[in-house]
Image (cartoon, rainbow, N blue to C red):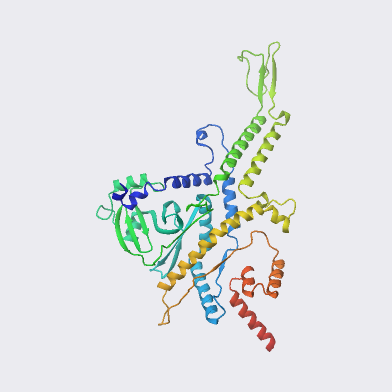
Amino acid sequence: MTDTMTLPQQLRSLDADRLRRYAENLAFYAGDQWPASTTRAKHRRLVFNYAKAIVDKTTSYLISGLNFAVDAADDTPEAAARARATEIALAHVYDANQLDQLDFDTEIDAAILGDGAYKVTWDAAERRVRITAPDVQGLFAWWAGDDVSRIWRVASRYTLDAESARTMYGLRGDSSSVQSKSARRLSATQQPGLRGDSSSVEIVEVWTAEQFELWADGARIDQRDNPYGFIPFVIYPNIREPKKFWGASDLPVIKEPVRELNRALTQLSMILELSGNPIAVLENVTESADIAVMPGAVWELPERARAYLLDLLQGGGVKLHADYVDLIYRALHDLGESPRTAFGENRAGLSGIALNVELDPLLKKVARKRLIRGAAYRRRNEMILRILEQYAQPVGGQPSVSYAPYRSRVVWGSVLPLDRSRLVADEQALITAGIHSRRRAADNLGVEDPEAEFRRWLEERALEAGG
C-alpha cells in the first residue's frame, strides 16, 4: 500500500505518537494541566504553572553567555588568518540572523517538545545565509539502519496561505496547480498540526544529500539536484534517550507533581474560603420553615437542638495541607532538577563551593544539554561555512575563500554567578603557567574580539614605550 502512496500521503500516518506527545506537552506548558476528567467540573481549578517557570528558567541558565570561537589549525600565520576570517564570517551570519534570540526561542521549544531543529540555506534574493528554526511538529527524518546519527532523508511539512504560496512558489489557487479546495480541507484535517483552512496550501520539502523535491497539496511541483550537497537541517534532541533519534521533553517528569500541586492548592483555597464564610450547623432540627438566612436573624430552636459554626481550621487542619503542599513542592524541584536557589531564594547566603553543591542538580542538567547543543551548533557552523564557500563569491576576481577544516568551538557562559575579579586572577595564573593562551582566557572572560583587543593592547604598549 505504501508503495503506491506519495510521500506527503505517507506523512499523514507517520510518527503519530510523537506528534501527539508534542501537542500534549504544548498544552501542558500553556497551562492546560488538569486531567481531562475534571475539565467540566464546576468548582474552581487553580493553575500554578511551575512547568513553564522551570522550562524558562532552565533555558535561561543553559544559553547564558553562549558564544563561539575558531582556533587556528596550526601555528602558521596562514592558519591564524584563516581562523580569524572564519570567525568574522560566522559572526556576520550570527548577527544577520539574530541568532541570540532565535537560539533562546528554539531552546524553549526543544525543552517543551523534546526536539529542536535549525535549517541553514542560501537566500539568493538577499545574498546571505539564512538560518531558521522550523517547527519540529512538521519534521520527519529517516536514518540508516540502526545508526540514528546518519540521516539520509528529511521531510519538512508546513502550510502557507494562498498569497504566500503564490509569491514564493508561483502557485495558483486552482486545480491546475494544486489539489482542489475540498481535497485540501480534507488533507489538513487528517494531519496533526495543520489548520483546516481552505485557503491554505500544504507544502512538503523533501531533502536528501543528492536531491530536493517540493510538493504542494500532494502534487510534486519541483524536483532537482540538491544545490548544497548535504541535507541543510540540524535536528537534535533536548535530552537524548539511548538508541533513539527523537529526544525527551523536560515536562513528563514534572507533570504529576504539577497536577498534584494544583489540586492541593485548589483544595486549600476552598477550605480557606469556606472558613471565611462559615457554615452554620443545626443539630436535632427536623424542619427549617422558620430558619431565616439573613443578617441579624434570630432563630428559635426546639428543645435539645443546638446551633454552631463549622470550624474547618480547628485541630491544625490548614497546617496539614500546607505541609503536604511543601512536600509536593520539594518533589517538583527535585524531579525538575531546579533547586529553589535557582529561583533566587538563598536564605542561607550560600556562595562558592556551598552554592555549587546546592545548585549541583541544575548544573548537571545544563551540562547534559550542553553536550548535545555543542554538537548541534558546531554542525550548524559547518553548514554556514560550506554554503558561504559555495555562494558568497569574493568581489574583484579575488581567489575563493576556504574555511576548511570548518572547525569551531562553542564557548559557554558560567551557570553560577561569578566573581569577575577572581576569574581574571585565575586566568592570569593559567596564562603564566602556560596552561591557557591569552586567546583562550579572553574567550572565557567574554571578550567578543580577542585578536582585535590584543592588537589594541600592543598599540597602546608601543605608544607608551615611544612616549
Looking at the picture, tell me which residue is in the foreground, 133 or 288: 133
> In the picture shown, does residue 83 fall above or below 366?
below
Please state the horizontal and vertical placement of residue 51, each as a whole percent of the image. 57, 46
Q: Quadrant of residue 400?
A: bottom left
Tally of numbered discs: 0
Q: Is residue 196 left or right of residue 380?
A: left
For this orientation, the residue located farthest to the front is 146
Going 62% across and 14% down the picture, which residue do you hit?
290
Please state the horizontal and vertical placement of residue 173, each as a whole percent of the image. 29, 54
Going 63% across and 68% down the picture, which residue do you hit?
444
Q: Is residue 167 visible?
A: no
Going 57% across and 55% down the picture, which residue do you hit?
59
> In the picture shown, does residue 49 fall above or below 273?
below
Q: Is residue 88 left or right of residue 364?
A: left
Looking at the picture, tell me which residue is in the foreground, 333 or 145: 145
Q: Is residue 409 visible?
A: yes
For this orientation, the residue located farthest to the left is 176
For this orientation, the residue located farthest to the bottom is 466
Please state the horizontal and vertical placement of residue 203, each as a whole percent of the image. 35, 55
